[in-house]
Amino acid sequence: MPDASLLEVFPAPTDSPFVIEHTSEEFTSVCPKTGHPDFGDVTLRYQPKAASAGGACVELKSLKLYYQSFRNEGIFYEAVTNQIHDDLAALMKPEWIQIRTDWKGRGGIRSTILAQSGDVPEEWRRG
Amino acid sequence: MPDASLLEVFPAPTDSPFVIEHTSEEFTSVCPKTGHPDFGDVTLRYQPKAASAGGACVELKSLKLYYQSFRNEGIFYEAVTNQIHDDLAALMKPEWIQIRTDWKGRGGIRSTILAQSGDVPEEWRRG
Amino acid sequence: MPDASLLEVFPAPTDSPFVIEHTSEEFTSVCPKTGHPDFGDVTLRYQPKAASAGGACVELKSLKLYYQSFRNEGIFYEAVTNQIHDDLAALMKPEWIQIRTDWKGRGGIRSTILAQSGDVPEEWRRG
Amino acid sequence: MPDASLLEVFPAPTDSPFVIEHTSEEFTSVCPKTGHPDFGDVTLRYQPKAASAGGACVELKSLKLYYQSFRNEGIFYEAVTNQIHDDLAALMKPEWIQIRTDWKGRGGIRSTILAQSGDVPEEWRRG
Amino acid sequence: MPDASLLEVFPAPTDSPFVIEHTSEEFTSVCPKTGHPDFGDVTLRYQPKAASAGGACVELKSLKLYYQSFRNEGIFYEAVTNQIHDDLAALMKPEWIQIRTDWKGRGGIRSTILAQSGDVPEEWRRG
Amino acid sequence: MPDASLLEVFPAPTDSPFVIEHTSEEFTSVCPKTGHPDFGDVTLRYQPKAASAGGACVELKSLKLYYQSFRNEGIFYEAVTNQIHDDLAALMKPEWIQIRTDWKGRGGIRSTILAQSGDVPEEWRRG
Amino acid sequence: MPDASLLEVFPAPTDSPFVIEHTSEEFTSVCPKTGHPDFGDVTLRYQPKAASAGGACVELKSLKLYYQSFRNEGIFYEAVTNQIHDDLAALMKPEWIQIRTDWKGRGGIRSTILAQSGDVPEEWRRG
Amino acid sequence: MPDASLLEVFPAPTDSPFVIEHTSEEFTSVCPKTGHPDFGDVTLRYQPKAASAGGACVELKSLKLYYQSFRNEGIFYEAVTNQIHDDLAALMKPEWIQIRTDWKGRGGIRSTILAQSGDVPEEWRRG
Amino acid sequence: MPDASLLEVFPAPTDSPFVIEHTSEEFTSVCPKTGHPDFGDVTLRYQPKAASAGGACVELKSLKLYYQSFRNEGIFYEAVTNQIHDDLAALMKPEWIQIRTDWKGRGGIRSTILAQSGDVPEEWRRG
Amino acid sequence: MPDASLLEVFPAPTDSPFVIEHTSEEFTSVCPKTGHPDFGDVTLRYQPKAASAGGACVELKSLKLYYQSFRNEGIFYEAVTNQIHDDLAALMKPEWIQIRTDWKGRGGIRSTILAQSGDVPEEWRRG
């Protein structure tokens, strides 16, 4: 099941503001209603806090393992998106953070969910 | 015939604002004038109310069944679009909601209908 | 010859504002100068008045028959575009309306004509 | 109505074999069943007889006028294709000739008809 | 040689503002420096004056003949573009007018010239 | 008018067989029926005779000037194609030669003409 | 070596403001560090001064010869771009001018340099 | 290991402001966590200081060698991006500078990092 | 001028047959007729002789320098292609070899030359 | 340095013939002539021997480590390709095997090397 304890961070390497984007094209969870697997892309975008303010970056392999922990979890798209947002926001306390999930067709319906918090710059607000 | 009682909701998973988009590429109804089938895409986009305010999300399988209930209904494009809008707005009482339908050619004419209500953010106003 | 009496309407299904777009890719009329046929696409876009204000929508099959009534009419591109605009504006008295025609090459020249009236939202003003 | 007398020829310019292809993207006739217009592309491909054997080529403007003479004719796709084939074959008596028609969607169905006669080279036999 | 007397107009069909665009892909003139032919596309875009104010539209066949009158003229790209602009502006006295020419490579250099006058709406100012 | 005396050759540089292809995208002549200009692409493909057998290659600038000599000639597509074929075949006496012309739309009809002689390899026979 | 004396001008044909763009895809110079040739595209964009103010346009063939004069010059990308900018700005004294160079890969690195002066309209400021 | 001493500069060729962009598609370093190689694109964009103010440009071959010095270094994406930014900013003291790295998939996750400083013009702020 | 002595070889690494293809997109020479530069792509494809039979491969940097030696040579397309073919065939004595050159437009004409010798496999015979 | 002992196999799962393709887009080695890194794609395609005949398949992670062992090796493209071919052919003794390497531009020249052995089916012979 989703396990935020798998996530690891390393210190932000600088006090200068910069932006990080990680896109996973191999996310899968299970539909709580039908029991069938769901497949989607997950995009994480954030600006870490400054190094001198204790800024942190999520380590990439730990992020992959965290994503993999949803594999057999029965969970709605909306909940997946907000849980990833909340876990990573709590972990890194970034200046701003954005999670966008794009789900493959299920019963002929494609879905996209967008959750964000902090002061997201205008050019990224649509996800 | 169109049956809004098929629709089910689950509670919004968070108080944070986020956006949900579901696109169905397998919608069909019947032209009330000619009796021939119509085929189209239906896009639903909305921001649920906050969880603490009783916010709700439409469940995806129930949405599919609801869409399927139009299959043998004789109904104009314009009415389909507004009925879906009205049924889902009444069901979820979202912050804002948008329905866009794109219909395949009929007699050499392609059609698009766009209905929306609430405070739709500027970047999505064109549907 | 162009026959606006072929056009039929049905009542707008709602008081909420919404937008309707119909694109015909099979329009043909005749050049009044050379007598040769012209071929083009015709796009109609409009927002009907509210249902409670007597709003009306053009019925799609009647629109097709109306377009077909230009088939053997000798008429310039500019006049076609404005006549369709004027006939449909008089018929439906919509909040706003826009007609765009895109004509196939004639003597090596392709043409586009754009007529509109009412309060066309900024995002559609280019046709 | 279709009028083969509109067709004109000019003498083939050479005894050497060569191939001519004319593609019209502005063909229209009328469905004899529904009375609605049909729209399609017509491709003519042929090798004229040698000049010394009285070979002839169809003149392009006369071909356009001939195609236009189908404009208000109620006629099936299959009959259009064969009539064009037969009229042009009778007119030019070419080494070989091929007519291919590609029709726009009607009731969601697109159609292609291929008629040919004479010794069509292998590389063009599929139309 | 360029002959503006070939141009004909017909009265604008309406008092409502509308936009007309004609694109010729078969323009040719001659380089005054080398004597070799130049080839390009010419796009005319304008809004005629209102009908009640004596508004006029250029007739399409006359426009083709006017363009053909440059065929053997030795003239620079810049002068072609401005002469077409000036001739059509003088002829129609439109609300605004824009001429864009796109020339095929000459000595490995492709060129585009853009001339306009009147109150060109912002969305068309780049040509 | 078409002037084969403009064509110049230079000796084939080798006894080894090789293939040469020149494609002009700036060919124009005049329709003998309507007096309007025609525009097309002309592709020449050939294998020169061996150098020791007096093989010759057409010089590129002279080919351009030869093509330009058709600029104001009233001549059918079919005749243009065969005349270019015959002039170049007589000039160079190549092992094989192929001329393909592709003409822009005229009255809604696009045309392609293909003339060839000698032992054209199978892989190029369709032009 | 680069020779601005090759450049020729002709008087601007009008007092109306207009924009000229010339793109060369056949520029080559030599790397001053390695001695190897560099290859790139050069785009010139400018608005000439008004004719009555002595406005001038660069003649296209002279521009080609000027570009060719860099062929065997050892010179950095940055210097090429600024020298072309400065030579053409001094020659024409235009209202505004912009030079953009796009260089093919060298050691796995592609480069773009952008130099401009005068009042470049906002829509062209990115080159 | 990363060696900023490999970097060389040459004086900016002008006092006029201009923009330089170098894109390397052949960057590789090593993941400090797994020991596996990482592959990415590195884009450098900057405006040098004016020549009279001691402005400097990085020499292209030295930039390639500097990038190659990361080849066997174990270093996170975030640190690579900021180190390149910091080394080049310290070397050239440009008006503004921007480094964008785009990394190939690792464990099914693609990443992009963006670091910038100085007064980056609005049109380039998204990297 | 073209200098085959710049070419270096290294021994073929195996007795097994294999195929090598090198494509240069930065070839330039000079037209012997006009003195203007020509630009083209050069593709070399060959199968070396077996290592035990003294098979040889052309070294890539030497090939680049050899190509660069044509930079200021006045030479026809046909001669360039055959000289490269002959120089490389003499140098490596491969099982088979093929040279294809694709030249940018000159006077509106694009050209391709194909020279080959030895037993070229059927799948590569068109170049 | 290249280390074939890193490669591991597992038994082919069936007696039926089938085809396996692995494409690596992250291959890098070093040019033995210049010392600069080379980057390329490596495609392995093969048909294993039947299970009952002792057929074997290469294990994917071991293949990745084997490819990584070339990272700091100075070796020509031709030798890389044949060594990978020979190592994998010796390891698996497949029915047939094919290695294709596609190298990024070096000095403006892109290269492709193709080595194969066994009875490669006709449809894959071009690599």
Image (spheres, coloured by chain):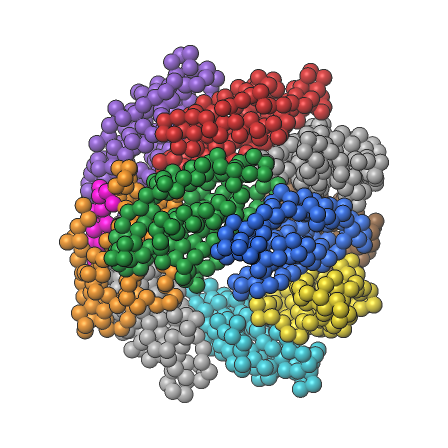
Chain colours: A cyan, C orange, D purple, E green, F red, G blue, H yellow, J brown
State whether residue F9 is above or below residue A45. Answer: above
Is residue G119 found left or right of G6 in the rendered image?
A: left
- Quarter of the picture containing the N terminus of chain H is bottom right
Position in image of residue E115 (x %, y %): 47, 53
Residue occupying the point 76% across, 73% down: H90
Depth order, front residue of C40/A125? C40
- Quarter of the picture containing the C terminus of chain H is bottom right
Residue occupying the point 18% across, 63% down: C10
How many numbered badges does the structure rendering display?
0
Depth order, front residue of D99/A9? D99
Q: Is residue J5 visible?
A: no
Depth order, front residue of D56/E48? E48
Residue occupying the point 57% across, 67% down: H123
Q: Residue furthest front?
A: G52
Q: Is residue C62 magenta?
A: yes
State whether residue D79 is above or below residue A3. Answer: above
Residue occupying the point 58% across, 41% down: E106
Q: Residue furthest left?
A: C5
Position in image of residue C108 (x %, y %): 40, 40
Position in image of residue F58 (x %, y %): 62, 25
Q: Is residue J103 magenta?
A: no
Is residue C77 found left or right of C61 in the rendered image?
A: right
Give the residues in magenta.
Answer: C59-75
Position in image of residue D8 (x %, y %): 31, 23
